[in-house]
Image (spheres, rainbow, N blue to C red):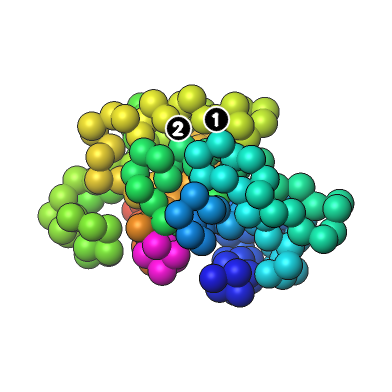
Amino acid sequence: MRELLCELLRLFYDKGWVSGTGGGICAVEAPGRLLLAPTGVHKERVTPDDLFVVDVSSGEVLEAPRNAALKPSECGEIFRAIIAARGAGSVVHSHALSAVLACDRASDDAIVIEHLEMLKGIPGLSNTDRHLVPVVENTPREPQLTADVERVLGDERFARACAIGVRDHGAYLWGEDIWEAKKHTEVYHFLFEAVLARGGSR
């Protein structure tokens, strides 16, 4: 799993979703144990030995990398909130331009996505559904987003969403395991790009 997380970071870097040291990823390694990428580093260069192991409930660092200069991702608190609320096994944080610009198209507090075949890539959705992705306002530091993330996770309008947009920032995306998180990350980025290409939802 450590190697797979690093492979996905390289893949997402190539797609422009975690460039400039931005973005992040995590996955539940075993009950209570969360593998977490470091912060402030070039994500395409992260190795398995650079990952932290933190307690899923408390965020306490259980195992740190040998490189003492590394620090755990600032997304950790948000990752753990999504895991707690949705039972996610893996969460991705993207800084993709498409996610940022799709948030600009949001109607009030949600990106509206409809009339797209790719909606079938999200559990429980069909191409005839009107899908709402919640959008929260950005903050100076990542952990300050947690309260708003928890709020939209509890909003029934967004019960089917596997993504949260952050205005002027990017998005958080998740799945029940690392492979579903990868799929949802790819599906939502396609949907964000489609919303932009159409000039907004229909």
In the image: residue 164, left or right of residue 201: right
Q: Does 155 appear in magenta?
A: no
Give the structural element (helix, strand or loop) at label 2: helix
Look at mark 2 in the image and give the residue it sits on: 149
Residue at point 40%, 40% (across, down): 84
What are the residue bounds of the magenta stretch? Answer: 177-182
Q: Position of residue 148 (x, y in %)?
A: 46, 26
Front residue of 94 and 105: 94
Give the structural element (helix, strand or loop) at label 1: helix
How many callouts does the rendering have? 2
Instruction: Kindly report the secondary structure that dominates the magenta region of the rendered protein.
Output: helix
Give, as a three-letter code, the residue at label 2.
Val
Q: Position of residue 101 (x, y in %)?
A: 50, 45
Mark 2 in CB contact with mark 1 (< 8 angstroms)? yes
Tag of residue 70: none
Residue at point 42%, 56% (across, down): 89
Q: Quadrant of residue 154?
A: top left
Q: Residue furthest left?
A: 128
Look at mark 1 in the image and give the residue it sits on: 145
User: How far apart are the two marked residues, 2 and 1, measured between alpha carbons?
Assistant: 6 Å
